[in-house]
Amino acid sequence: GNSVTQMEGPVTLSEEAFLTINCTYTATGYPSLFWYVQYPGEGLQLLLKATKADDKGSNKGFEATYRKETTSFHLEKGSVQVSDSAVYFCALGNTGFQKLVFGTGTRLLVSP
Amino acid sequence: DARVTQTPRDKVTEMGQEVTMRCQPILGHNTVFWYRQTMMQGLELLAYFRNRAPLDDSGMPKDRFSAEMPDATLATLKIQPSEPRDSAVYFCASGLAGSSGNTIYFGEGSWLTVV
């Protein structure tokens, strides 16, 4: 079945450090891939997405590239801020718009 | 901005009481999801609807949970009777099948505590 695996957290960084959160997936067909972010006490917000292989999603300085050959969709940001502290979820949506499958989430803590 | 609206935002109730959570999906969206989030289990899909018809409710405990869409602007999730293990954040999300990328949008959640 479809599944998403994310790196364990928490990821602890200093402000302006480089961020990578790993995400790999298993899927049939040609899924779309997503990163959602959840700030404390809030719901999930779509951060970025990619719908086909080699697509790069980007938003707010975050980027992720859909790599079919490595079945990965790693999230990166060149310089994190304290305000980026949140939980990040990688998700997969299969063709036909069935339910999204989420990873377990990775907590990011950024200190000044 | 269009958004998914959920009520109540917070609910504390006693074990055995009925709890109803409501969701207004984004206007025009034809697919509605109910997710539950806990520390132990993470995000779990409880049920989802397409054009108001239930497509999958396999994630939902059938003996006490029920989900319905009385009309296109309202989805409900009911727990009767509630138990302490139901304490969680319940998220509603909506999307438009056939749109680019199958994006779904989440509400802010209903934070349920059963004591």
Image (cartoon, coloured by chain):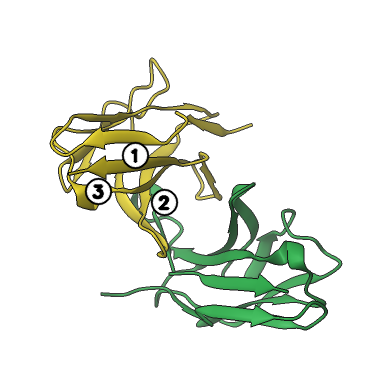
- Per the image, the residue denoted by label 1 is A51
Q: Amino acid at mark 1?
A: Thr
Contact between labelled residues 1 and 3, with CB atoms less than 8 Å apart: no
Mark 3–mark 2 distance (CA, rounded to whole Å): 25 Å
Contact between labelled residues 2 and 1, with CB atoms less than 8 Å apart: yes
Q: Vertically, is A21 above or below A67?
A: below
**The disc numbered 3 marks a residue on which chain?**
A
Mark 1–mark 2 distance (CA, rounded to whole Å): 9 Å
Identify which residue is drawn at 47% across, 30% down.
A8
| Chain A, chosen colour in render | yellow
Q: Quadrant of the N terminus of chain B?
A: bottom left
Q: Amino acid at mark 2?
A: Asn
Residue B2 in percent (x, y) is at 31, 75
Identify which residue is drawn at 86% across, 67% down.
B63
Q: Is residue A24 visible?
A: yes
- Per the image, the residue denoted by label 2 is B102
Callout 1: 10 Å neighbours few (<14), some, many (20+)?
Answer: many
Residue B31 in percent (x, y) is at 52, 64
The chain whose colour is green is: B
Res B47 → quadrant:
bottom right
- Per the image, the residue denoted by label 3 is A84
Identify which residue is drawn at 25% across, 42% down.
A110
Instruction: Give the side of residue B85 with respect to residue A13, left or right.
Output: right
Q: Is residue B52 visible?
A: no
Contact between labelled residues 2 and 3, with CB atoms less than 8 Å apart: no
Res A32 → quadrant:
top left
